Each structure stands twice: as C-alpha cells, then as structure tokens.
C-alpha cells in the first residue's frame, strides 16, 4: 500500500470512528469494533486503540451513571488530539477552510494538522489566531471540515 493510500485509509477509518461515536452511545471498544464492522470498517483492537488515541477520544460520563466514548475530550499523544481543544471555529468556502483559535495558538494547531498528513489537504498557513487550510477540491474540503468539527466540537 502506498503512503498516500495508507494516509487516505487512515483518514477514512478515523472519520468512521468519529461518526459512530457521534451517532451512538458506545461504552466499550468491543461495541465500537462491532458497529464499525457492521458499517464495513474492519479494524483490530490495537488499531482502534491507536486511532482513538490519535483522535483524542476518551471515555466520559454518559449521564446515567456509566461511561461512554466522547469525541475531542482527551489530550492523547496524537498530533491533532493535543491541539483540538484550541479550535474555536471551523468555516469552509469551496476548497478553503478557515480555523479560528485563541490568539497565539494557530501555529500549533496548524502543525498538528500538518503532522496528521491528511491526503485531502494540500497545505496550511497559520497566523496568530487563524489558519487557512487549502484542500484539493470541494469534496475533500467537506471531509476535512467534518473531521475537524468532530474532533474539536467546533
């Protein structure tokens, strides 16, 4: 598998994981693996653990005395997970995405996005509190926008 198709596969896996967590109350990795499998995404438990960590997904209270997976809540070791908390807003126009952060945080968030190496993104430009992401086309920009919103709660 080429690096580009491997990156694309990882991005699609991560989007699927975030989609399930957003749509359902998932309490265990086994439940998450089963639901992903039902949706045609087959992962090992080890791969799922790495993706959850990279995405900043962690368990949090479910409001009924138990716990469930929540998006954008952890400060895991993943490049984006560590900076997702600084994303205040995400807006898209065609193939361009503007990400707003608190003053002084755009460079760090841009670096986190760059380190993720999402194949949909051609490049980023980070200022003081604003990042411009340039995507290949509108369709890929929509995927990036959705993923950023999911991991950051923006």
Image: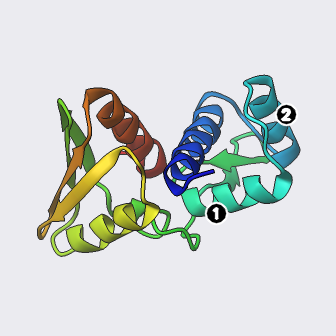
Picture quarter with the C terminus:
top left
Instruction: For residue 73, say whether it is visible.
Output: no
Q: CA distance from mark 1 to mark 2?
A: 19 Å
**Outermost front residue:** 2
Residue nearest the observer in this picture, 32 or 40: 40
Instruction: For residue 126, say whether it is visible.
Output: yes
Horizontal arrangement in the rendering, residue 82 relative to residue 20 (left or right): left
Give the quarter of the image for residue 115. Answer: bottom left
x%, y% of residue 96? 18, 40
User: Looking at the rendered structure, which numbered label has been put on residue 34?
Assistant: 2
Q: Is residue 106 above or below residue 22?
A: below
**Outermost left residue:** 127
Q: How many labels sit on residues? A: 2
The residue at 47%/49% (across/down) is 151
Residue of label 1: 53
x%, y% of residue 30? 88, 43
User: Looking at the rendered structure, which numbered label has been put on residue 23?
Assistant: none
Look at the numbered disc 2 and give the secondary structure of its residue.
helix
Which badge, 1 or 2, comes first in the chain's sequence?
2
């Amino acid at each position: 598998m080429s690096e580009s198709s491997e990156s694309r596969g990882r991005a699609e896996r991560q989007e699927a994981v975030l989609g399930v967590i957003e749509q359902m109350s998932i309490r265990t990795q086994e439940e998450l693996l089963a639901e992903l499998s039902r949706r045609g995404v087959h992962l090992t438990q080890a791969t799922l653990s790495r993706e959850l960590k990279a995405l900043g997904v962690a368990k949090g209270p479910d409001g009924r005395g138990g716990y469930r997976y929540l998006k954008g809540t952890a400060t895991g070791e993943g490049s984006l997970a560590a900076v997702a908390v600084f994303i205040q807003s995400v807006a898209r126009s065609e193939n361009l995405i503007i990400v707003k952060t608190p003053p002084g945080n755009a460079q760090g968030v841009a670096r986190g996005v760059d380190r993720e190496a999402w194949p949909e993104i051609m490049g980023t430009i980070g200022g003081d509190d604003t990042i411009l992401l340039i995507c290949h086309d509108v369709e890929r920009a929509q995927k990036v926008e959705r993923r950023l919103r999911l991991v950051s709660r923006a």
